[in-house]
Amino acid sequence: MTLLMLGVGGFLGATSRYLISTYGNKAFPVIPFGTLLVNLLGSFLLGMVIALELSSAFNALFATGFLSAFTTFSTMQTEAVKLFEEDQRVRALLYLLLTFLAGTLFASLGFIVMI
């Protein structure tokens, strides 16, 4: 049953990430905004899940399944490298700083909201 929960959560997370990233990156092309948005939202939601200490079935579905497929470290790194290669170093650094600093902030806020 746990594997089914992981699969369902992963499918929903990956599909959601694709839709949000595609439209977000087109709407705000200065930096990869769609990827930034899914990573920040995912950080916030994971902070909430950690604070709630929910059942292992829910964690399999949502935290491990959905959020693992929803957020993406590898795409963020690829997009940052691409910006560097295109000689857009300021945008690349801004993107990386926003991802790491705001990601930590959003995870903390998600945790605080739930306690």
Image (tube, rainbow, N blue to C red):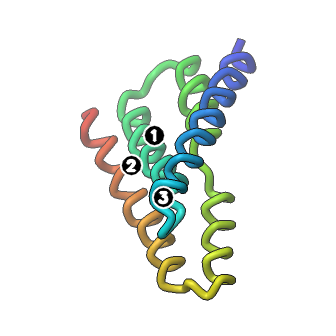
Q: Where does the image place residue 68, in percent across and percent down from the top left? A: 62, 40
Which residue corresponds to mark 1?
46
Element type at mark 1: helix
Q: What amino acid type should be assigned to the residue bearing mark 2?
A: Ala
Q: Quadrant of the N terminus?
A: top right
Element type at mark 3: helix
Q: What amino acid type should be assigned to the residue bearing mark 3?
A: Phe
Which residue corresponds to mark 2?
107
Work out whether residue 62 or residue 41 is closer to the camera in this orientation and state it.
41
Decide: few, some or many residues near mark 2? Use Cα within 10 Å; few <14, some 14-19, many ≥20: many
Location of residue 57 with respect to 47 vertically, above or below: above
Residue located 63% across and 41% down the image: 18
Apparent side of residue 73 relative to residue 7 in the rendered image (left or right) = left
Residues under numbered marks 2 and 1 in contact, where contact means CB atoms less than 8 Å apart? yes
Decide: few, some or many residues near mark 3? Use Cα within 10 Å; few <14, some 14-19, many ≥20: many
Rounded to the nearest angstrom, the CA distance separating label 2 from label 3 is 18 Å
Q: Where does the image place residue 46, in percent across and percent down from the top left? A: 45, 40
Q: What amino acid type should be assigned to the residue bearing mark 1?
A: Leu
